Image (cartoon, rainbow, N blue to C red):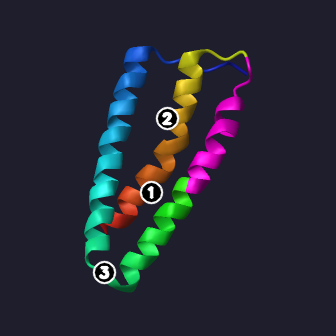
Amino acid sequence: MTKTPTKTWPELAIEGWVLGAEMSAVIWLRSLRMMTGGRLAEHEAERMVSEKITAAMTLFPAILAGGMNQSAEEATGRAIAHYRGPVRANRKRLSR
């Protein structure tokens, strides 16, 4: 089994920027949903808090899955990958 090449800092910076842009879209879409009020807004707020707690508690184990001797680039790549999936799923769900 071959190891995937570690991404460079410029590649990670671009991935981080894209993730940040997608996160901004999710924040905007969630804000719109919460401004409407009612049951849907309440459910979204509860979901948001739950997701944030889960993401924070699972980040450290996700990074450590690469082992103690991984490079900073590998750890950063794992952190970006950890958040990419849920952020993208929320953007798609909220955009419907």
Residue ID at (38%, 80%): 40
Residue 90 placement (x, y as % from top left):
42, 59
- Amino acid, disc 1: Ala
In the picture of the structure, the residue carrying the numbered disc 3 is 37
Q: How many marks?
A: 3
Q: Which residue occupies the foreground of this view, 57 or 66?
A: 57
Residue at far bottom of view: 38
- The numbered disc on residue 80 is 2
Q: Amino acid at mark 2?
A: Ile
The quarter in which the C terminus is drawn is bottom left
Q: Position of residue 52 (x, y in %)?
A: 52, 54
Q: CA distance from mark 3 to mark 2?
A: 32 Å
Q: Amino acid at mark 3?
A: Gly
Question: Do we see residue 5 in this rendering?
Answer: no
**In the image, what residue occupies the spot 61% across and 54% down?**
54
Q: Write the residue at 47% across / 63% down.
A: 48
Residue named by callout 1: 89
Residue at 57 percent across and 17 percent down: it is: 72
Secondary structure under the numbered disc 2 in the rendered image = helix
Foreground pick, 8 / 34: 34
